[in-house]
Amino acid sequence: MNTYKIFSTVCFAAMMLGGVSCKEQLDVGNPNAPTVDANVNNETGLIQLAQGGVYINGFAGNGQDTWLGDSYFSLPLGYQELMADHVGADASNNQVTTIAQPDYIILDDGTKQTNPSPQIGIIRSYNTRAATGNANNAIYYQWLNMYSLNNACNVVLSLVDGIKFSGDATSRANTVKAWCYWWKGYAYASIGSMYYSGLINDKASSTNGNYVLHDAIINQSNTYFNQAATTLSGISSAADYQAVLKQLIPAGNQVGRGGVPTVDMWKRSINTMLARNIVANKLAPFVNGNPDAKIGKSSTTAMTAADWNSVLTLATNGIRKDDIVFTGRSTDKNSFFSATGGTVAALTTGVNNSTTFKISERFIQNFNPGDKRFTNNFNTANTYKNNYIYTTRYNVIDGGAGAPGVYVFGTTAVGAYEVFIAGSYEENALMLAEANMRLGNIEAGLGFVDAVRSYQGAGVATVAGTGLNLSKALTELTKERQVALFNRGVAYYDLRRWGWTYDIANGGGSYGNTVVTTAGVVNKNVTINYNFLDYWDVPADESVLNPSASGVVTKNPNF
């Protein structure tokens, strides 16, 4: 990670998102050559820095995420949706057409089709600094975005105690601190959930070679999420809190489910993210309908009853249906992502022959018959033919077909699509569903599945009270998580923890899949052996320039 490059963009990012000149906002320094020392020495300047450090440094990626789409929500999240087999791609950019190709599939007639270039080999072949320079290193970008976000927050935290705040100064300062702690928790969660090892770096514009394993990174994420909650509890002036947070969140994000959360709402979002950190980073195998499946070798451990009880406690105190949460929307100008290229959803919307991503047959198979979310969002006007895994009959209708009260999966209209940056009601409810099922409360769990379907306007028959056993209940849960949480940053983690992305020889694999051949033959019971790298290696741009000084390896040794 080039910390000096990241550091030098922080003030510039803040002023760009504000939509006005640095001099107008800060009234100090040179707007043509902003620096932290000269331009961030009062409350307004610090708030602008804190806003831009998140939305530009973290989510617009310092202009690095423009090879295919234009933000964190189209690029790193794009890889997640690709590896979850929710979308496909034929672009050559940065291995999007190869990173999600399974090792092999077995069609209904027993024909085995094998990938000559397995994913693990592709990732490691292109994890070089030269490949990054040629826009060919897929695992570089999430690391860049999240450590840029982390460093921006470190910079703000290093300045906040020296700033003179108006009003209730303690409440205003604590609002800024909670903001930074929250986003640092978010950044560490992203790194720890995706990479085998990483760095804990809590000092502004510095680095170290003390790599730690991903579970230690997740622990640091939890520490900062909890510190954010503690800091929020110390705020005594709701008015000053609201005034500062309203400035920290761009106005274009303060609509729909987005806005300025109350202190209690924000704490509930923290609980949801703490629950996600547990769920995303431990195994809960459910392979071929077997709730007792085991994965023979992985880079993490299996969920225990104690883990599920922790998830149940956190999610019970997590995001509620009417809570304001952290979301993002495109705007006409000064947006941190565009309406047509900033999200996986936008890049999948339209006729499949012309879209960057193509909605997958495996994604579509998760809808139950009669689901209005399907009829409102997808049609079969065109079939895209590529290879045995990316051929699809389905297209995403731009803005949906107009069914009232039904969730829309994709639109390219400015400001219309709402990105859930962190947790959502649906994710929290589905964690409650899974925790209850795994702890033996199947009916309670199914009730949460029904609640999510009702919330998104699915209009399907309820599954609670129908006498489903654990296997069938988990089937409904896994289908609903894939449908309801599309483009929300958890897709790959789900398939990994359920065991589907692991080698069949190791107890993994995905069964009962729909695959359409280029000849138009529809297979309904295909076995897929993805055999993906479960946690990525550290990108070469970090590991080569900053080798490990702690003895912790930067290459996943389990694959």
Image (tube, helix red, strand yellow):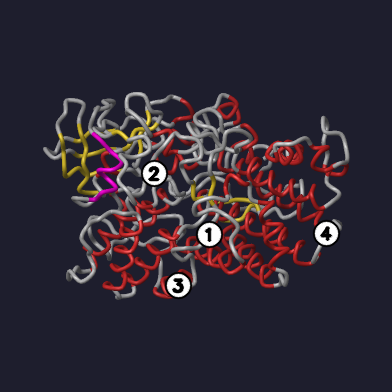
Mark 2 or 3, closer to the camera: 3
Name the N-terminal-most of marks 3 and 1: 3
Q: Is residue 137 left or right of residue 519?
A: right
Report the magenta residues as a range.
Answer: 371-379
Q: Could you tell me which secondary element the residue under label 4 belongs to?
A: loop
Mark sitting on residue 165? 4
- Amino acid carrying mark 4 in the image: Phe
Query: Tag 1's secondary structure?
Result: loop
Q: Disc number at residue 316? A: 3
Q: CA distance from mark 2 to mark 1?
A: 36 Å
Q: Which mark is residue 324?
A: 1
Which label lies toward us, 2 or 4? Answer: 4
Amino acid of disc 3:
Thr
Q: Earlier in the sequence, mark 4 or mark 1?
A: 4
Q: Tell me residue 221's x, y (percent).
A: 60, 60
Which circle's residue, 2 or 1, is located before the other in the chain?
A: 1
On screen, residue 62 above or below 292:
above
Give the x, y percent position of residue 283: 39, 60
Residues at marks 2 and 4, CA–CA distance in whole angstroms: 50 Å
| Closer to us: 250 or 533 | 250
Disc 2 on helix, strand or loop? loop
In the picture of the structure, the residue carrying the numbered disc 2 is: 532
Task: Tell me the chief SS of the magenta region.
Answer: helix
Inter-mark Cα distance, 4 to 1: 26 Å
Please rate how many residues cluster around mark 1, counting C-alpha atoms within 10 Å: few if below 14, some from 14 to 19, many from 20.
many
Q: CA distance from mark 2 to mark 3?
A: 33 Å
